[in-house]
Amino acid sequence: MIKLIVGIQWGDEGKGRASHFESKNAKIVVRATGGNNAGHTVVANGKKYKMHLLPSSIIRKNVNCIIAPGVVIDPEVLISEIEEMEKAGITITKDRFHISERAHVILPHHKKLDGLYEKLKAKKIGTTKRGIGPCYAEKCNRTGIRMFDLCNTSTLKKKIEEDLLLANTMFKQYGEELVNPEEEYELCIKCAEKLVPYICDTGSILIQADEKNENIVVEGAQALYLDLDHGDYPYVTSSNCNASGTASGAGIGPTKVDEVIGVMKAYCSRVGEGPFTTEQDNEIGDKIRELGYEYGTTTGRPRRCGWLDLVMVKNACFVCGLTSLCVNHIDTIGKLEKIKVCIGYEYKGNNIEYVPIDREYCKPIYKEFEGWETNETMTEYEKLPENAKKYIKFIEEYTKVKVQYIGIGADEKQTIVR
Ligand code: IMP
């Protein structure tokens, strides 16, 4: 059984938590796209773990974890994450942790370029400045360095020199200090010492697992509306983090996928710039931010907050081919006395129920709901307050997709499965 878990808003929906929950019965968990722009927080057994590159299920000793071809890896960040985990008593051996030799490597010049591009842009994207965009750009330009190159150091120096030609031309043009290829080479050699044992052909591991009918969970990063093709371009990340892109990044064909779980919050949040039709840049947004602790795991930035936008969710159901929904933060939003949900847009004189390319012209049409209180005893759907059930039922009616998982607290135990 292969399950994909993808974000269907602007990220930070709680995918790590959903994936960690699903991985209980899995043999393998795969991280498929993005890089350390992502931040996953998992609370298990009262302990909080924060990850950026490692799949969140690394904390389960019986689960094998893969970083797949579609990911871009900052090797220093990955090493420090492995070391952090080891300090927390989690053993990471080459028998249970595998890095694809096809994954691309983020180098210092990518981070420097990320900063420079942002500085030069009149309309800032608000990137995480982790070098994600420039690394994917060089991948497309076919000049990138892959994890495979860390295992083949005789050709590495030449590749880095070639890769740096364009970047250094840019730096020269804009009066920035040039990046020395020797320094990037030395950095790769240093990181290779620690990472090479884990680098392999992850595709054959997945094929073998599939042949044995083992459960595989693919953990998406970012979300549909940050997707390079289907998101709010240019205010997006540089990978295809929709469901098909996630499967492709993992190295899994579409017909091999059995379930696609779309993870969303009971409201919306967004970090960085870009349109946000239901944004509440007021005391309601402030309240949601405080109640939901909406601050970035990666950058610590306060997240922009607003009401749930069901037009976006419904569109995601089709684009991602969702088989079920996971709605997190039902406890958080219920604390408000009145809750609004966007069920359509007023757009250039018409009422519409799709997401137009120029959605900055959309005005939300809302339906109002009453709040509720949840507590730890509500471990089953039937035990939820009537108002919470009405809210969830409405999401199902509107999207025609079942809400299978409901998050009513940060701990993985506070997940209702229907
Ligand atoms: P980049 O991925 O660093 O290039 O940033 C591009 C946009 O995606 C920015 O608006 C970021 O804030 C946003 N972004 C990237 N990764 C995440 C994530 O994991 N959660 C939420 N927003 C993200």
Image (tube, rainbow, N blue to C red):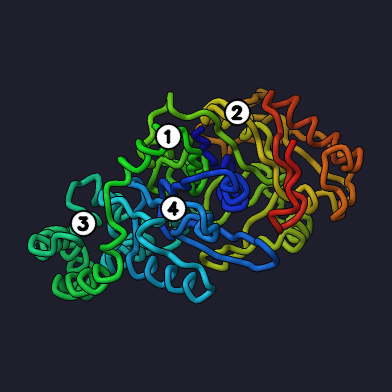
Three-letter residue code for mark 4:
Cys
Residue shown at the point (30%, 56%) measured from the top left: 134
Residues marked 4 and 2 touching at CB (< 8 Å): no
Closer mark to the observer between disc 1 and disc 3: 1
| Snapshot quadrant of residue 151 | bottom left
Q: What element carries label 1?
A: loop
Mark 1 to mark 3: distance in Å? 33 Å
- Which of pointers 4 and 3 lies earlier in the amino acid sequence? 4
Amino acid type of disc 1? Lys
* Residue 145 numbered tag: 3
**Circles 4 and 3 in contact, beta carbons < 8 Å:** no
SS class, disc 3: loop
Q: Label 2's element?
A: loop
Classify 10 Å Cα crowding around label 4: few (below 14), some (14-19), many (20 and above): many
In the picture of the structure, the residue carrying the numbered disc 4 is 65
- Viewer-nearest residue: 149 or 193: 193
The quadrant of the image that shows the C terminus is: top right
The CA distance from mark 4 to mark 2 is: 24 Å
- Residue 45: which quarter of the image? bottom right
Image x and y of residue 221, in percent: 49, 48
Residue 396 sits above or below residue 160 on the image: above
Residue 32 seen: yes
> Label 3 amino acid?
Ile
In the rendered view, tell whether residue 186 sits above or below residue 114: below
Question: Which residue position is annotated with label 2?
Answer: 323
Q: Mark 1 points at which residue?
A: 212
Q: Are marks 1 and 3 in contact (CB under 8 Å)?
A: no
Where is residue 85? Give x, y as percent: 49, 70
